[in-house]
Image (spheres, grey):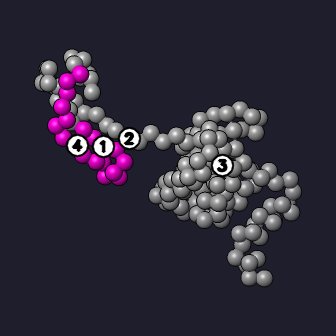
Amino acid sequence: MKCPFCGAEDTAVADTRLNDEADVVRRRRKCNACDKRFTTYERAEIQLPQVVKKNGLRTEFSRAKLRASLELALRKRPVSIESVDAAVADIEERLLSAGEREVTTQQLGELVMRELKKLDKVAYIRFASVYRNFEDVDAFSRAIREVSPAAKKK
């Protein structure tokens, strides 16, 4: 590794540690030329699929956009931040395990709805009403019956 102070390539690792989540390696290095110390961080580079929008445009997957969508649907609902983090991680894991290079917004929306259905039924209905673009009250009622415990008993 090149020294950021003098540019020499002769450096030595003085200490290596993992962060608490064990997904980042922190290395303290010492330059053998100028004796200065510096820190480097290593993280696995994960390639999430491109998102194909309805109009055909392709864009980078954005964890922030995914999280914002979930948070919008869950606004003022009793769901913990940890649960939202877990849902985002689960969606990312599903995308990675699928091994596809592209994912449509429709597929992504279905994954979001699956997670919201587990987290909070009201948030699920909020998201579904926009995502599925309900045209009438009947479509809305069907979605409510889908998650309503009373409807499942009948």
Residue 84 in view (yes/no): no
Q: Mark 4 points at which residue?
A: 16
7 displayed left or right of 81: left
Q: Mark 1 points at which residue?
A: 25
Does the stretch in magenta take in 110?
no
**Quadrant where the C terminus is found in the figure:** bottom right
Asked if 10 appears above or below 77 in the picture, the reply is above
Which kind of residue does numbered mark 4 sit on?
Thr
Instruction: Tell me how far mark 3 sits from mark 4, CA to CA.
Output: 38 Å
**Quadrant where the N terminus is found in the figure:** top left
Instruction: Tell me how far mark 2 sits from mark 4, CA to CA.
Output: 13 Å
Say whether disc 3 or disc 4 marks the residue closer to the N-terminus: 4
Q: Work out whether residue 135 or residue 27 is closer to the camera in this orientation and state it.
A: 27
Q: Mark 2 points at which residue?
A: 43
Query: Marks 4 and 1: CB-CB under 8 Å?
Result: yes
Say whether disc 1 or disc 3 marks the residue closer to the N-terminus: 1
Instruction: Tell me how far mark 4 sits from mark 1, CA to CA.
Output: 7 Å
Q: Kindly give the residue lying farthest to the top in the view shown.
A: 6
Q: Which of the two discs, 3 and 4, sits closer to the camera?
A: 4
Q: Work out whether residue 98 or residue 104 is closer to the camera in this orientation and state it.
A: 98
Which kind of residue does numbered mark 2 sit on?
Arg
Query: Marks 2 and 3: CB-CB under 8 Å?
Result: no
Q: Which of the two discs, 2 and 3, sits closer to the camera?
A: 2
